Amino acid sequence: MGNIIAAIAVLGILGALFGLILAVASKVFEVKKDPREEAILSHLAGANCGGCGFAGCADYAKAVVEGKAPVNKCAVGGAACAAAIGKVMGVEAGSSDPVHAVVNCQGQTDVCKPKYEYQGIQSCSAAAALFGGPKACSFACLGLGDCVKACKFGAISVVDGKAKVDVSKCVGCGACAAACPKHVISMRTMAAKPVVLCSNHERGAAVNKACAKGCIACGLCVKNCPEQAIVLDNFLAKIDYSKCTGCGTCVSKCPKKVILMPADFE
């Protein structure tokens, strides 16, 4: 009996000793946290969407305090959030144009031809791993909803086999673009300028075989743009928005109706 009591006493003493050591160590090796981090966190939306390029709101707040990120990277919080964080940091927030996602593809079920019947996991990433996906166009939106799952704001749905963005709900976080294995979702400003709704880099003949609404690199948009704001980049029209005035000439000249104004597809 005495041995049991002695063992319990020893364990109790050791436990108290280790507890004391841990308490001292926690004070000695404590990592001081800048109070500005908490202040910044209080102004952030708390969505942890990753649109700022960091793992979450806390990670972004830490980066701002350390001078590794600007104060206006929170797309969800917008200008008001940037101004509040700028006040915490004692800097001007600066201006940033609001952005939202756009699906650079018109490959709905009745537009893009099928390559095979896919019966696997309902995931774009999984389908893309199988011969590039079930659509004849290897650049097309697969419409299996990886972007829908990634969006925390309910701003994307799949309609007729293709992702569609609800601009009224999109905050421009970029989570959908990061989740798309085909890279057909891009982020653009809200400016009323034309958009190339195609991501296919193949030659015209191949595009026509796969899709009814694909860029065939005919060059009419390039030749007719009064601002010389369009080039053909690897058989795909590309708009330089620093030159584009939004005149819409390219929209009217495109024979495949691949270039559209936002009001025509959003």
Image (cartoon, rainbow, N blue to C red):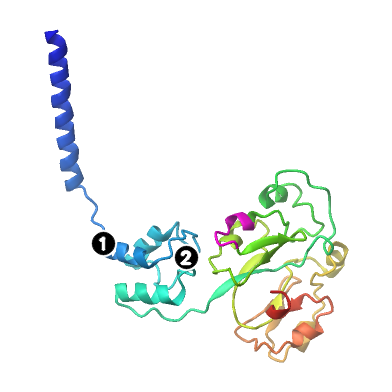
Count of labels shown?
A: 2
- Helix, strand or loop status at disc 2: loop
Q: Residue drawn 77% across and 61% down?
A: 160
Residue receiving disc 1: 34
Q: Amino acid at mark 2?
A: Cys
Q: Residue lying at the far bottom in this picture: please name it.
A: 226
Q: Residue drawn 80% across and 74% down?
A: 217
Residue receiving disc 2: 52
Which picture quadrant has residue 41? bottom left
Q: Residue lying at the far top in this picture: please name it.
A: 1
**Dot 2 crowding, Cα within 10 Å, few <14, some 14–19, many 20+:** many
Going from N to C along the chain, the mark reached first, 1 or 2, is 1
> Residue 226's spot in the image, x, y percent?
72, 92
Residue 265 is covered by the magenta coloring = no
**Dot 1 crowding, Cα within 10 Å, few <14, some 14–19, many 20+:** few
Q: Which residues are magenta?
A: 147-154
Q: Residue drawn 82% across and 77% down?
A: 218
> Residue 176's spot in the image, x, y percent?
60, 61
Residue 14, placed above or below residue 168 = above
Q: Is residue 258 left or right of residue 98?
A: right
Q: Residue drawn 20% across and 44% down?
A: 26
Q: Amino acid at mark 1?
A: Asp
- Helix, strand or loop status at disc 1: loop
Nearer to me, 19 or 184: 19
Q: Which mark is residue 57?
A: none
